[in-house]
Image: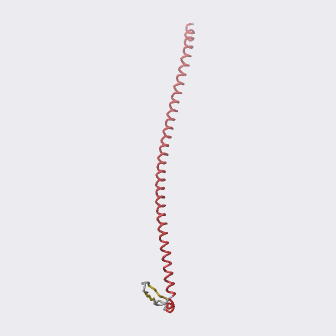
Amino acid sequence: MILPIHSQIISKGEVKETINSKGDTLVIMHLEDARIILNDLLEYEIADSLLTVYKEKDSLNTNTISLQKDVIFKLTEKSENQQIQINNFQTILDNKNNELLLKEDTIKLQKKEIRKQKFQKILGFSGSVILPILTLLALL
């Protein structure tokens, strides 16, 4: 078995490995190469852990987007329903205005009829008073 002390004399880019009697593998390489490999492993480990975080955030964002789409759809539907209600209320208001116009016309017609009847009444009473007086004067 080669001791780790011998790893100091291995040149850059050279890798040696040994397997002991228990079946364990010992890899011997230059210190700078080991640092590069460990840095790469650390970056990949961080990237892998970030990948799961990003996947989780993405699924949460996807859920949020679908919920927002549902809210937008419901708000659009609500807006359409409110527009229909506004149209119905406008129709009711138009009908009410038409009824008021009809009532005003009826009132005007009734006022004309009342004036006509008052005039005829005055004429009738006047005629019933004036005709006998004229008849008496004509006879005298």
Task: Name the residue nearer the viewer: 24 or 109.
Answer: 24
Task: Name the residue nearer the viewer: 124 or 92.
Answer: 92
Across and down, in percent, residue 61 comes to: 48, 63
> Which of the 4 quarters of the picture holds residue 125?
top right
Task: Name the residue nearer the viewer: 27 or 138.
Answer: 27
Task: Name the residue nearer the viewer: 111 or 44.
Answer: 44
Q: Does 73 appear above or below 110?
A: below
Q: How is the image coloured?
A: secondary structure
> Which of the 4 quarters of the picture holds residue 131?
top right
Q: Does 57 appear above or below 138?
A: below
Query: How many callouts does the rendering have?
Result: 0
Which residue does the image show at 47% across and 47% down from the upper left?
Answer: 84
Which residue does the image show at 42% across and 86% down from the upper left?
Answer: 21
Q: Quadrant of the N terminus?
A: bottom left
Across and down, in percent, residue 128 comes to: 54, 14
Q: Quadrant of the C terminus?
A: top right
Across and down, in percent, residue 116 comes to: 52, 24
> Which of the 4 quarters of the picture holds residue 133?
top right
Pick out the residue farthest to the top: 140
Across and down, in percent, residue 44 comes to: 48, 77
Pick out the residue farthest to the front: 21
Which residue does the image show at 49% across and 40% down from the upper left?
Answer: 92
